[in-house]
Image: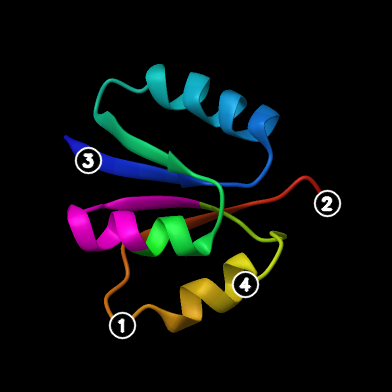
Amino acid sequence: MASCLIVDDEPLSRDVLRKYIAEVQDLKLLGECRNASEASHELNKAHVDILFLDINMPGLSGISFARSLKVSPLIIFTTAY
């Protein structure tokens, strides 16, 4: 089973992703983060296989956050734009 984490500042987007993830039997949602800072904290706490990462977030963008990771899970970029 693959573990995953949602990183998105929009509650509606997190809701949609959570519903899709729940439909995939081999995915386990470890949590949800509203920004890169929260995501960094979560990535330090637990092993994450897949990161659903919003591109457009306040502060550090998803792309900048992804580039900053020394060890990176698989990343699926998400965006409403």
Question: Which label sits in the foreground, 4 or 2?
Answer: 4
Question: Which label sits in the foreground, 4 or 1?
Answer: 4
- From this view, report whether residue 37 is shown above or below residue 70: above
Q: Residues within 10 Å of mark 2 (few under 14, many from 20)?
A: few
| Residue carrying label 2 | 81
Label 3 or label 2, whichever comes before in sequence order:
3
Q: Are marks 4 and 2 in contact (CB under 8 Å)?
A: no
Q: Amino acid at mark 3?
A: Ala
Question: Is residue 40 or residue 47 the one in the foreground?
Answer: 40
Secondary structure category for the residue under label 4: loop
Q: Amino acid at mark 2?
A: Tyr
Label 2 or label 1, whichever comes before in sequence order:
1
| Residue carrying label 1 | 70
Question: Which label sits in the foreground, 4 or 3?
Answer: 4
Q: Amino acid at mark 1?
A: Lys
| Residue carrying label 3 | 2
- From this view, report whether residue 5 is shown above or below residue 37: above
Residue 60 magenta-highlighted:
no
| Residue carrying label 4 | 60
Q: Is residue 41 left or right of residue 9?
A: left
Look at the image and give the residue range highlighted in magenta: 41-52
How far across and how far down the image is residue 49, in percent?
A: 26, 52
Secondary structure category for the residue under label 3: strand
Question: Is residue 45 or residue 52 the one in the foreground?
Answer: 45
Q: Are marks 3 and 2 in contact (CB under 8 Å)?
A: no
Query: Residue at horizontal 71%, vertical 62%?
Result: 58
How far across and how far down the image is residue 42, in percent?
A: 31, 54
